[in-house]
Image (cartoon, helix red, strand yellow):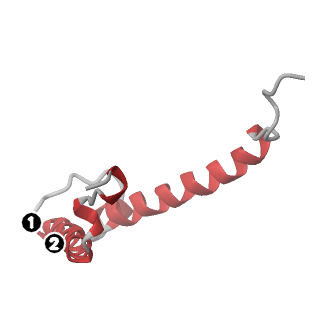
Amino acid sequence: MNADDKRYWLDDPRNVTTVYRGLWAFGIALLLLDFVVHRHAEADFDGVFGFYGVYGFVACVALVLAAKLLRRGVMRPEDYYDDR
């Protein structure tokens, strides 16, 4: 067996499907826990069902978009560090 022929556990599509379904099940279980866990809401809107999941998703998307904007200002040409 060559080093190039090495197979990893995520190379099998069945394993990828299992991980994907497991993540969905975990997310749904966390969402259903919102019915059981009592939250001490400080404001009216943070007591709404699923608020923390939606808030986390929106915050994650905002971070990705902010990083894309920041990249424009920080990015340097490909040969920036080459000897001249």
Element marked by disc 2:
helix
Q: How crowded is mark 1: few (under 14 residues within 10 Å), some or many (20 or more)?
A: few
In the rendered view, would you say 9 is above or below 31? above
Q: From the viewer's perspective, tell me whether residue 44 is left or right of residue 58.
A: left
Instruction: Give x and y (percent) for residue 82.
Output: 81, 27
Q: From the viewer's perspective, tell me whether residue 43 is left or right of residue 36.
A: right
Q: What residue type is labelled 2?
A: Leu
Instruction: Give x and y (percent) for residue 61.
Output: 52, 60
Q: From the viewer's perspective, tell me whether residue 55 is left or right of residue 37.
A: right
- Contact between marks 1 and 2 (CB within 8 A): the answer is yes
Residue at x-position 71% and y-position 51% = 69
Element marked by disc 1:
loop
Residue at x-position 26% and y-position 58% = 8
Which quadrant would the C terminus be assigned to in this image?
top right
Give the residue number, with chain letter if any, for mark 2: 32
Question: Which quadrant of the figure has residue 31?
Answer: bottom left
Q: What residue type is labelled 1?
A: Val
Question: Which quadrant of the figure has residue 27?
Answer: bottom left
Q: From the viewer's perspective, tell me whether residue 38 is left or right of residue 51.
A: left
Q: Residue furthest right?
A: 84
Q: Residues within 10 Å of mark 2 (few under 14, many from 20)?
A: few
Give the residue number, with chain letter if any, for mark 1: 36
